Image (cartoon, grey):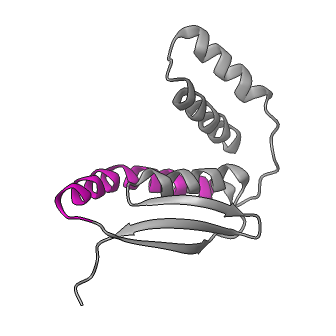
Amino acid sequence: MIGYLNLLLRLAIWFLLTADLSLANIAIGVAIALLLPRGSTSPGALRDWLHALWETLVALPQAYLEAVEIMLRPHNQEAVTMERVKPGRTPGLIFLDIFLITFTPKTIVLKYHEHGWYEVHRVERRRNS
């Protein structure tokens, strides 16, 4: 099951990069996804993948709400914070975490630190003092 999720993630990335759903591009994407090396998986990885897929579904409406909020109310405050990577994350899940953080309009991952941290830039509303 994890192998299928990794394959789907690789294909999704391929289609996002190429923006081409032709039969030839699908065949090339499948070939590349199958030829890329695979990492080791842990027993809890399936649960982590399912949780990440749920977070992806939740991020879609959140991204639209944040975009509308930025248009309606100015966001003048910026902050850079460090967020801890969840323990035991595979490289694919780390990529998906970075993608989800960057997908929403108010946040972007500036850097992934190999010691288990994301450096995240946030745009926030200025609080009235």
Q: Is residue 40 magenta?
A: no
Residue 113 sits in which quadrant?
Answer: bottom right
Image spot of residue 66 (x, y percent)? 29, 58
Which of 24/112 is in front?
112
Looking at the rendering, in which quadrant would you find the C terminus? Answer: bottom left
For the point 71% across and 29% down, the residue is 33
Front-most of residues 87 and 108: 108
Q: Is residue 44 above or below residue 117?
A: above
Q: Decide: is 33 above or below 74.
A: above
Give the dominant element type of the magenta stretch: helix, strand or loop.
helix
- Residue 27: percent from the left, percent from the top? 64, 14
User: At 71% across and 39% down in the image, what residue appears?
Assistant: 3
Q: Residue furthest left?
A: 72
Question: In the figure, 11 relative to 80: above or below?
Answer: above
Magenta residue span: 46-74
Which part of the image, by quadrant, shows the N terminus? top right
Q: Position of residue 53 (x, y in %)?
A: 50, 50
Whether the magenta-drawn stretch holds residue 71 is answered as yes
Q: Is residue 36 left or right of residue 80?
A: right
* Quarter where residue 58 is shown: bottom left
